Image: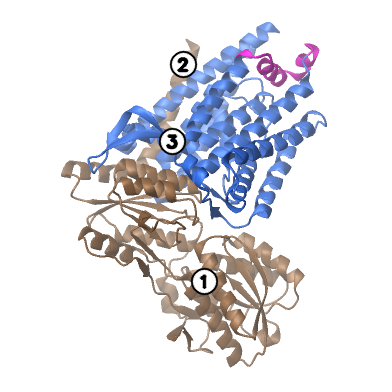
Amino acid sequence: MKNKNKRSLTKSNLLLIITIAVFFLMYIGAIIIEGQGFLKPQTFLNILNANAALIITSCGMSIVMITAGIDISVGGVAALVSMCCAVYLDFHDGSVFMSIIIAVLIGLAFGVVQGFLVAYLGIQPFIVSLAGMFFARGMTTIVNTKPFNVANEAFVGLKSTRVVVPGLGTLNKLGKYVDAYVEIGVIVAILIVIVFFCLLRWSKLGRHFYAVGGNEQSALMLGINVKRTKFLAHLLCGLLAGIGGYVYFLHVGSGSASHASGMEMNAIASSIIGGTLLTGGVGNIIGTLFGVLSLSTIQNIVSSAGFDQAWWTGITVAGMLCIFLVIQSVIMNRKKK
Amino acid sequence: MKKGRIISIMIVAILLLLAGCSRSADREMIAGSESQSEGVSQKTVIGFSQVGAESDWRSANTQSMKDTFTSENGYELIVEDGQQKQSNQIMAIRKFIQQEVDYIILAPVVETGWDTVLHEAKSAGIPVIIVDRMIDTEDQSLYVAWVGSDFELEGRKAGEWINQFLQEKNIAHANIVDIQGNLGATAQIGRTAGLTQVCETNENMTLIASEAADFTQARAREVMTGLLTQYSDINIAYCENDNEAFGVIEAIEAAGKTAGGDIANGEIMVVSFDGVNKEALKDVQSGKIACIAECNPNHGPLVKSTIEALKADEAVERFSYVEGALLVHDNTVSSISVDGVEYTTTVVDEAQIEGKQSN
């Protein structure tokens, strides 16, 4: 068994190297196609700013996928979180701290219910989270139908807080020096990536996730509490969806039922590009981070290629996913031999 | 050894993919490098963040921008497709700031949540012009001008037309359902408000239901099918764009009823907005749609004159409205008046249909 664990680690490492290499190739490609815009550090930081929420939810998605599950409710949860917090902050003049608590609680609630249904009642994770997605989207509209701006002062203050990255600023066209910056959400995302990378790699729970996803039967025979492990995976995913939702909310600063639409699919795609296997047992949070970055770099290149080429985004992402799935199965087959 | 081979295959595959993208980007790239070699001052670079390509109106709107800001006219237009997502549009604007464009045109997907990014554009010294939908902000200095349609006026024109039509046909009372657009979109807010006003002031019109169908044909069909089972006495369906009207007509026909202006004989009259594609005008000609309050997508020229005024340091019109006609099936109503201004109706003929783009 120990041997098997070791093997899946090397597989995961190879996939990780590929992901990182692809990202750098993408970025060099972007510099070639787009020209100077991409050479500026701020362009890269903007990709981080825009995708902090996606990075966080993708981490949760990866954990669930490592246990061979899936959670497609994360986008809905993010929308619900942003709407609830917006209503709380704007209509009830609430405090920012409480709104964060609300976000975390909503995420945890989804995690607990879905985790229970999946782990202890043995219902397919896809079905459970599909119901979760519809429920969250529906609830968002019930909480408030119309999109609106949050004017709460403390919140707006937090939203416009910039963390200056020293040494990366550039001169703008007025000849003024502009500091390079990231939003608060990016700091949260990076912390989460580090924490969950360590959790998955070194903690007992983290190793249990891999064991359960790799082979449920043998994990059970090893004395791992499979149900509890699956439950915790969904719980963490829900929690991260809640935090991701709040970071998304912090990025746009408004509540709307259409927020974070398609986020769950982007999270799944990022995890796969990042080397997480859909069959479970293999995956890496750092890979997921690069998965998100690759995905948004493609979107960036394609969206500026001109209006008529907008469908290129979908096709390129589909092509990338195909290539990654083929590579993954090739590696898996080679290892089996 | 084998690992290395796999990685190299990968790299080739990705490069091929990139090459696929770059082919489509070639034109822009060439345009970009030209302006660099000629010196930045030669061409005015404009970044246009469009909502997406969800409707025919939207495509016509993008085309208008492309036709206006051509390189022959001394412009370089970078269009970014937001694919209906605000986060994509925020990202696009930030990219324009990094690319140091001269002007930013923003067609916002929703009204709220733009303050931060527009503030960044302002501090980078790039004037922002809002088109189509309005933005909701406290700080009016975040944009220099707005170009678009007066949606409330459109709604009132359509409402007033219904009112006149009912009077001409001697119909004492009609029940109206409002098939709304995306809740919160400027067009939806204005068109709903326009209808509500007319219904409140005229006793012959009752608004019995309002439901959102997101400006799409499929959703409108669902919504209308539901409304038809719920209410048996619908006389008029007020659709907030043409795509919705198509869906509503499908639903009416599927329910065994007829879409048309003969309300007295049980037909359901469809009133709609936009009037940008051939199919919609053909439906007006055949009578399935009784009236379309046109929403002119041709924003390009007005935006251009705003930008030229900005370049010359002249005062700019803060709000510019594009004119829209009332396209009707027959001349039962020859003209209507809203706020004392007379608007004549235009009966749709072949020539007008030819002038529009088809799907």
Q: Is residue B207 above or below residue B334?
A: above
**Residue at point 54%, 32% (across, down):** A55
The secondary structure type at the circle numbered 1 is: strand
In the rendered image, residue B126, in percent from the top left (x then y), is placed at 30, 50
**Element assignment for label 2:** helix
Disc 3 target residue = A47
As helix, strand or loop, the secondary structure at mark 3 comes to helix
In the image, residue A216 lies in the stretch drawn in magenta: yes
- Chain on which label 2 sits: B
A69 or B128: nearer the eye? Answer: B128
Vertical order, A308 against B156 (above or below): above
Question: Badge 1 is on which residue?
Answer: B273
Quarter holding residue A101: top right
Q: Which chain is brown?
A: B
Displayed quadrant of residue A33 = top left
Relative to B274, residue A97 above or below: above
Q: Are marks 3 and 2 in contact (CB under 8 Å)?
A: no
Q: Chain of mark 3?
A: A
Looking at the magenta stretch, what is its main secondary structure? helix
**Mark-to-mark CA distance, 2 and 1:** 58 Å
Q: Residue furthest right?
A: A121
- Which residues are the magenta region? A202-223
Mark 3 vs mark 2, foreground winner is 3
Disc number for residue B5: 2
Q: Give the answer, above or below, for where A261 lies relative to A123.
A: below
Give, as a three-letter code, the residue at label 2: Arg
- Mark 3 surroundings: few (<14), some (14-19) or many (≥20) residues within 10 A: many
Chain A takes which shade in the image?
blue
Residue A93 place in picture, x, y as percent: 59, 49
